Amino acid sequence: MGKAVTVKGRLSDPRHVELEEPLTDLLGAVEVVLRSAIEPANDSPAKRVERARALQGSARRQETDSVDLLREDRQR
């Protein structure tokens, strides 16, 4: 699994994101996901669960099962 970096910023127009801090750690291909930031003070537990489920639903499907990986590892 690769490194992940979360950098906060502001979308200034459809083609520009102003980052709050420089991004220098990652080199190579990256995947960028933009979502609206929600202030934690106004965030209820129900809203956090709803947002987590929405993020899980938007993630790529898992291509391998951990059980299959364990079986393969044991066969080696």
Image (cartoon, rainbow, N blue to C red):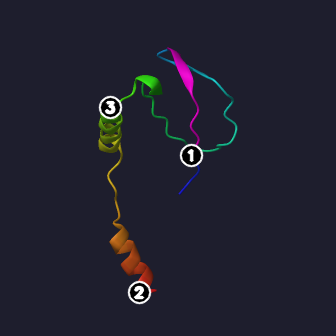
Left or right: residue 56 versus residue 4 is left
Please provide percent x and percent y for residue 21.
67, 28
Q: Residues within 10 Å of mark 1 (few under 14, many from 20)?
A: few
Q: Residues within 10 Å of mark 3 (few under 14, many from 20)?
A: few
User: Does 13 sit above or below residue 9?
Assistant: above
**Residue 47's disc number:** 3
Please provide percent x and percent y for residue 50.
29, 36
Please provide percent x and percent y for residue 52.
35, 40
Is 7 colored magenta in this rendering? yes
Left or right: residue 22 versus residue 4 is right
The residue closer to the viewer here, 24 or 67, is: 67
Please provide percent x and percent y for residue 53.
30, 41
List the single residue furthest toward the bottom: 75
**Callout in the foreground (3, 2):** 3
Say which element carries label 2: helix
Residue 57 makes an appearance in the image = yes
**Residue 75's disc number:** 2
Q: Amino acid at mark 3?
A: Lys
Q: Amino acid at mark 2?
A: Gln
Q: Disc 1 versus disc 3: distance between alpha carbons?
A: 24 Å
- Which residue is label 1 attached to? 4
Q: Amino acid at mark 1?
A: Ala
Q: Disc 1 versus disc 2: distance between alpha carbons?
A: 31 Å
Is 15 colored magenta in this rendering? no
Mark 3 and mark 2 lie on one chain; the one further toward the N terminus is: 3
Residue 37 makes an appearance in the image = no
Q: Disc 3 versus disc 2: distance between alpha carbons?
A: 44 Å
User: Does 61 sit above or below residue 7?
Assistant: below
Say which element carries label 1: loop
Question: Magenta part of the protein: which range?
Answer: 5-12
